Amino acid sequence: MPVKLAIDCFESSKEVKIMNLLLWILLGLIAGWLASVIVRTNRTQGPLMDIILGVLGALVGGFIMSLLGFGGITGFNIYSIIVATLGAILLIVLRRALLR
């Protein structure tokens, strides 16, 4: 019986990890798309780049907000989308500056 319980815990943990990964991708898509619309790069980059910039923006934005004393990414909510979008905007602006 304890072995079965341990297996059940492992399976639910695996499902939670997959769900978290999907939520990060969805958060990245939303934040990256919002950032590309705000900075007006939505015509020149595709949805894959939106996801990449959004996820990286979430990491950058969360790190910066933590340094400033605010919470980083706190889950799948409006605050986290705003933080991720601000981070993605920063990445887009830095990318533009480096490519000029």
Image: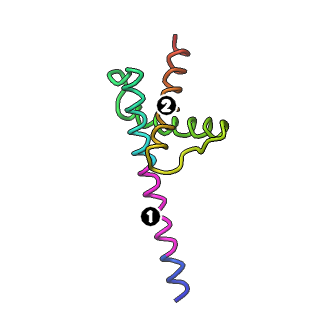
Q: Determine the residue positioned at 51% across, 74% down.
A: 9
Residue 94 in picture, x, y percent from top left: 55, 21
Looking at the image, which residue sits at the far bottom? 1
Tag 2–tag 1 contact (CB < 8 Å): no
Task: Determine whether the residue tagged by mark 2 lies in a helix, strand or loop.
Answer: helix
Choose top left, top right, bottom left or bottom right for residue 45. top left
- Few, some or many C-alpha atoms within 10 Å of disc 2 (few <14, some 14-19, many ≥20)? many
Residue 6 in picture, x, y percent from top left: 54, 78
Q: Which residue is mark 1?
A: 15
- Asked if residue 14 is among those painted magenta in the image, a careful observer would answer yes
Q: Which residue is mark 2?
A: 88
Looking at the image, which residue sits at the far top? 100
Q: Determine the residue positioned at 46% across, 55% down.
A: 20
Q: Determine the residue positioned at 49% across, 31% down.
A: 88
Please state the extent of the stretch shown in magenta in the rendering: 9-23
Which is in the foreground here, disc 2 or disc 1? 2
Inspect the image, locate mark 2, and give the three-letter code of the amino acid beneath it: Ala
Q: Is residue 21 left or right of residue 45?
A: right
Inspect the image, locate mark 1, and give the three-letter code of the amino acid beneath it: Glu
Task: Determine whether the residue tagged by mark 1 lies in a helix, strand or loop.
Answer: helix
- The answer to whether residue 8 is above or below residue 48 is below
Q: Nearer the viewer, residue 13 or 39?
A: 39
Residue 38 in picture, x, y percent from top left: 40, 24
Q: Earlier in the sequence, mark 2 or mark 1?
A: 1
CA gap, disc 2 and disc 1? 28 Å
